[in-house]
Each structure stands twice: as C-alpha cells, then as structure tokens.
C-alpha cells in the first residue's frame, strides 16, 4: 500500500465506507501502533509507559476505526483510553489538562467531508476530554469574559445552535446551563450520515439553513460547527452570515480592541478589504500559506520572535487563539464571540455592528483548475512561475508585497488603484490550482481573468476550461 496516498496535510484521510474504501480497520490498527512508536522516540519512554487518548465524531465508520486504532496501540504495548464521541479540540486538551495529560491523542474524523470519508488527526501536548470537562472549560471562559461568577451569565440571550448532526450538539446544552435560550437550535443529535446538510460552515446550504432558523426563531445569534468542531461560523440576529472574511474581521476587531498593534495571521485568500479593516482597527494583517497548520505554526513563530500575534485563522473557519494554546478550535472561537454577543445584547446592539465598516468586494469568485499531468506539482509551479515572470515585466500587474503562496496580483481598474486582485496557487493536498479573484468594480473579475488566461493559455497539463468560461473567452 502507498501510505502517502492517505496523507492530507498533517492528517490521514480517505474513503472509509463503500466502494473505494482505503481507510480500513487494518490501516487504523497499523497507524495506532506507529503512533506509539513515534511517541516513544519523542518522549524517551518505553511503550508500556505511553498512554494515548482516542475520540471520534459521529461518522458511522468511527466506532470501528477507533476500536482498531486502540487495538494497534495496545498491541504496541501502550495504554489506549477511549473517550467516545467528542470534538477535535477536546482531544488536544486531553494532552495538557490535569487529570488526563496523555502522551498523545488521536481524533477519528474527516471534518466537513462527506459521510463515507474518515480520517485520523494526531496530537501531542505541542500540537477527548469527556464532554463535561470540556464544557466546564468553556463555561469558565464565558464567566471570566463577562466578569461574573453567576450560574447563568447568559440569561436573556438566545443562541440557535446548528451542529449539523456532528459532535457539537452538546453546545446547546452548555448554552442552556448558562441561562441562554436555545430556541431555533437544530440537528443536535449525532447522525454519521449527515442527513440534513453537510456539516461545513462554508457550505451555502448549511449557512442558509441556519439563517432561516435564526430569523424564524428570533435568535440573537446562530452558531454552526463542522463535524468535529474545529471549524465554525455564526449568523447575526438579522440573519446575516458572518463567516470567511467577516468572521476574521469580527474576532480581529475584538482582539485588537483589547490590545492595539498586534498581528493577525490569516491564509492567503483573504480580501484587500479585510487588510484595510485590520489596519484601521490598529493591527497588522499577515497573509500566509493555506492550511490550518501553516497559519498556526507561523503565528507561533512570530510570537517566539517577539511579534505579538493573538490569532491564526483561515477563511474556512479554522481558528486558533494564543490564549487557547493555539489550538485549532472553532468552538472556543464561537465562545469568545458569544461573550461579546451577551455584552452587546445588554446595550441593545447586534454583534455584526462591529464589522459594519468592513469593505466587501463588489464581485468575487473561486475557480478550481484541475491539473491532469501526472507530475502535477511541477506543472503547477511552472504555471505560477510564468505568471510571476510576466507580472515582473508588465507595469499594470502589481505583485503583492506579502506574496507568500502562489502568485497574488493586484490591478488598477477604472482608474481606481488596487481595485481588484487574483491569487493563483497550488492546492495543499490535491492536483488542483485554486484561483481566487475579487474586484471593487463591476466587471473587474472578468477583466482580470481574461488577462490571466492570455498569460497561461499555452500551459500544458492543466484544464483551463473553467477559467475560459469565467473570463468569457471563446
């Protein structure tokens, strides 16, 4: 077996049910044993001294894969502790929380991917708790943020929770325990086939479903998680979705209000309007490579070098706060936002008013160009290099000064400076070149895509059909 085919960034992922199954119990068993060997080497311990915690989301393949991974751990001589269904952030916390402090943790999940997929995420203290422990930690954070020891600090707030039939349904229970109404909440019961909508905070159908629930029930705020709760988004009381750039702007504004002059690390596809927003709120916007581990590791590096960076966040909803050990934890992010929503409720204000001055593009699009050549990375890198070479010769093409992934080019459109941009890059995992473009001018996206197509039209091994269609090229 080619084990590298299962690699997905820092995780393992593959089809686990039905035709084309590659993530089998045998594979999970082998990975469990291999993780023990890695922990022994890193920690200088014997296998009999190693403990590993395991958790899963609600997928139907989860129990069998968790059991197999636990068998592999035990067969390697270590102790496996089954925490059942929980969130990805909770599994990390099991490595650093007193009373647990396992040597490593494995989360069985495929995040927002379809029900027949699954995967394994591996953690050490550098990198679940039973629901009651994690809930207590979140509850303590809410009381601390509101400056109270009250049993019900959220009394008067209405929060609609959409768990997408994943592992996060207990968040509604937490809200109720803290005094909030959860009228409008939906899909809280785990169902590994995800019958109502994909558990994905970026998915339009999922967001629309929550928007309807919020406006119909009159909730002050709605929250939505992916299957393992490391990604999230919210909907304001007026039904407006706050995800992607809006979500980044919202949490950035809150953190920068606490301390000006800090750096916010994001992935590479964030908008020009977001950069302006962060600057106007007293911060520095630092774009980095796509991939949640990439942005987290860069934020940690910046802090280590003396640059204050409280947040690493992707437009997909992956968010890690310094105050939370830079753990990729969408539920913790939402909890920080719930605190602010309660404060603003008392002032008869909506959470979304914080980002009222965020400049959003008139047009935006994302296109995925499939690379058909076997050596997809070389083909993609050559195409990016060609664009970079051309941009260096054409004064109308402005190479972004913070170009850290692929090639980001801005344009002056209709005599307006930097009125549009595109970013062409290689996917972190797949033989695909994602292309993002935004414009502040109507028709600007089509104009920029036409210019790009003229530069890469001779590229071999890339299906340019989606670009041709979006650019209106015959």
Image: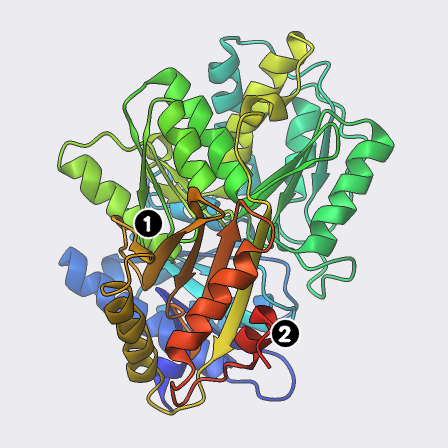
Using the image, determine if residue 47 lies above or below residue 178.
below
Residue 340: mark: none
Q: Depth check: give the residue in front, 389 or 393.
A: 393
| Residue under pointer 1 | 295
Q: Residues within 10 Å of mark 2 (few under 14, many from 20)?
A: some
Rendered residue at 43%/80% (across/down)? 27
Q: What percent of the width, then of the height, locates residue 13? A: 47, 72
- Residue placed most toward the observer, 416 or 323: 416
Instruction: Determine crowd level at label 1: few under 14, some 14-19, many 20+ residues with C-alpha closer than 10 A.
Output: many
* Side (left or right) of 162 relative to 89: right
Residue 88: give x, y in percent of width and height: 48, 51
Quarter of the image that includes the C terminus: bottom right
Specify how the rendered protein is coloured. Answer: rainbow
Distance from disc 2 to disc 1, alpha carbons, whole Å, reads 28 Å
- In the displayed structure, 76 sits above or below 364; it is below
Residue 357 % position (x, y): 54, 25
Are the residues flagged by discs 2 and 1 in contact, CB closer than 8 Å? Answer: no
Above or below, 471 against 265 in this view is: below
Q: Secondary structure at mark 2?
A: loop
Q: Quadrant of residue 50?
A: bottom left
Mark 2 or mark 1: which comes first in sequence?
2
Q: How many marks?
A: 2
Question: Visible in this render: residue 9?
Answer: yes
Q: Residue furthest front?
A: 415
Against 168, residue 393 (above or below) is below
Dot 1: element = helix
Q: Quadrant of the N terminus?
A: bottom left
Q: Nearer the viewer, mark 2 or mark 1?
A: 1
Residue 64 visible at all = no
Residue identified by numbered label 2: 116
């Amino acid at each position: 077996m080619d084990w590298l085919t299962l690699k997905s960034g820092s995780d393992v992922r593959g089809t686990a049910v039905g035709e084309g199954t590659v993530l089998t119990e045998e594979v999970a068993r082998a990975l469990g044993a291999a993780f023990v060997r890695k922990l022994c080497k890193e920690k200088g311990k014997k296998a009999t001294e190693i403990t590993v915690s395991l958790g899963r989301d609600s997928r139907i393949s989860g129990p069998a894969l968790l059991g197999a991974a636990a068998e592999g751990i035990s067969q390697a001589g270590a102790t496996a502790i089954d925490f059942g269904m929980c969130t990805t952030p909770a599994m990390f916390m099991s490595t650093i929380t007193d009373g647990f402090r396992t040597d490593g943790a494995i989360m069985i999940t495929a995040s927002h991917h379809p029900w027949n997929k699954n995967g394994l995420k591996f953690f050490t203290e550098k990198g679940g708790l039973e629901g009651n422990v994690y809930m207590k930690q979140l509850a303590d954070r809410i009381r601390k943020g509101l400056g109270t020891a009250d049993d019900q600090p959220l009394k008067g707030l209405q929060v609609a929770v959409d768990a997408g039939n994943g592992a996060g349904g207990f968040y509604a229970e937490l809200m109720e325990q803290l005094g909030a109404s959860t009228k409008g909440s939906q899909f809280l019961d785990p169902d590994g086939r995800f019958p109502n909508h994909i558990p994905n905070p970026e998915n339009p159908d999922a967001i629309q479903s929550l928007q309807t629930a919020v406006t119909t029930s009159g909730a002050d705020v709605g929250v939505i998680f992916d299957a393992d709760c490391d990604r999230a988004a919210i909907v304001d009381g007026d039904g407006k979705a706050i995800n992607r750039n809006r979500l980044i702007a919202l949490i950035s504004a809150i953190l920068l209000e606490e301390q000006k002059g800090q750096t916010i690390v994001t992935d590479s596809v964030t908008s020009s309007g977001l950069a302006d927003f962060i600057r106007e709120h007293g911060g520095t916007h630092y774009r980095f490579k796509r991939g949640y581990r990439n942005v987290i590791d860069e934020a940690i590096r910046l802090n280590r070098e003396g640059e204050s960076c409280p947040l690493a966040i992707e437009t997909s909803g992956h968010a890690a706060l310094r105050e939370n050990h830079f753990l990729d934890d969408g539920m913790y992010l939402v909890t920080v936002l719930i605190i602010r929503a309660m404060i603003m409720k008392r002032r008869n204000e909506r959470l979304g008013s914080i980002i009222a001055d965020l400049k959003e593009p008139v047009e935006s699009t994302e296109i995925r160009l499939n690379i058909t050549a076997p050596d997809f990375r070389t083909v993609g890198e050559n195409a990016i290099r060609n664009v970079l070479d051309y941009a260096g010769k054409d004064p109308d093409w402005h190479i972004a000064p913070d170009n850290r992934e692929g090639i980001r080019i801005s344009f002056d459109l209709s005599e307006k400076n930097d009125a549009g941009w595109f970013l062409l890059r290689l996917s972190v995992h797949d033989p695909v070149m994602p292309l993002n473009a935004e414009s502040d001018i109507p028709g600007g996206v089509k104009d920029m895509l036409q210019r790009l197509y003229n530069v890469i039209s001779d590229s071999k091994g890339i299906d340019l059909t989606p670009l041709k269609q979006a650019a209106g090229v015959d």
